[in-house]
Amino acid sequence: MLCWLNFFVTSFSSSLFLFLSLFILFVIHFHLCSKGIALLALKNVSQFSENHFNDESLFALIAQGIENNGYSILPTALPEILTNTLFTHQQTMEADKFKSAGIGRGKKYLKNEFVRTDAISWITGETDAGKDWLKWVAGLQSYLNRRLFLGLFSFESHFAHYSPGDYYKRHHDAFKGESNRVLSLIVYFNSNWLPSDGGELVLYKDEHDKEGTKVVPLMGTIVAFLSEEFPHEVLAANRDRYSIAGWFRVNTSVTDRVDPPR
Ligand code: OGA
Ligand code: MN
């Protein structure tokens, strides 16, 4: 009898032990899993915010403008973090990084004060700010290629600084059949721009247009236009004016011509 009792007690306590151990294991497992899920969620959030930088809804707006009108003008549209990074970088760049802009390429390089007087610095992607800019541009390029089949192949761009009195006379960024520049892209880094500050970009719809559309070079404004279609100019600025100008190219090799302005 005692033997049976003993058996029951020990088997009861060992199954209790087993049950308790399983319970503890379950609790630990659950804890780790939920932590894992939380970590995963955190990872997704950070991935999301990184992708958010390449905001497709902004790219869609740019594409829509190009598709419908050949150009897109979007005030304060560049992602704020990118705008601040580029603005800060441009402000801290040493003045000697900027070279006075010329017309033409290579040997044909020619400083032409009659046409333009701004100073420029080409963006090579060596700095973090340059990398961020080129990453954003790459996102835009791939979106435009998917949406509009533009076949954009490469991109080149420079910071530009217009000192008081600087201008860029009416010009084309590309001439029909003479260049593989297809899309111009400009962004601005100027706060509190007043009408008296001048320096507007004027985009003309064709050769005959004398009136044009004026764009105020305000912080984060994005302008994109088909390079061959729109003559344009920068009116003389009355204060320092900062921007990036860039061009997407298609992949055609035509060597016996000169592209403005590089
Ligand atoms: C250019 C140009 C316009 C601007 O650099 O070719 O047209 O508003 N820039 O800075
Ligand atoms: Mn131009």
Image (spheres, rainbow, N blue to C red):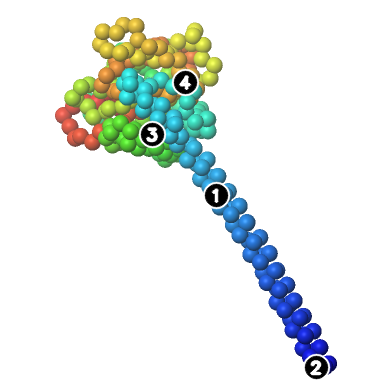
Q: Is label 3 in a helix, a strand or a loop?
A: helix
Residue 119, visible in the rendered structure: no
Mark 2 or mark 4: which comes first in sequence?
A: 2
Mark 2 touches mark 4? (CB < 8 Å):
no
Q: Is label 4 in a helix, a strand or a loop?
A: loop
Residue 260's place in the image compared with 253, above or below, is above
Task: Tell me if 135 is positioned left or right of 250 in this view.
Answer: right
Mark 2 or mark 1: which comes first in sequence?
A: 2
Indicate which label's residue lies in the foreground, 3 or 2. Answer: 2
Residue 43, numbered circle:
1
Task: Tell me if 53 is positioned left or right of 104 in this view.
Answer: right
Instruction: Please give the residue where the numbered disc 4 appears in the rendered image.
Output: 75
Front one among 112 and 232 = 232
Mark 1 to mark 4 CA distance (whole Å) = 32 Å
Mark 3 to mark 2 CA distance (whole Å) = 82 Å
| Quadrant assignment, res 260 | top left
Query: Residue flagged by tag 3: what amino acid is it?
Result: Leu
Instruction: Please give the residue where the numbered disc 3 appears in the rendered image.
Output: 140
Residue 3, numbered circle:
2
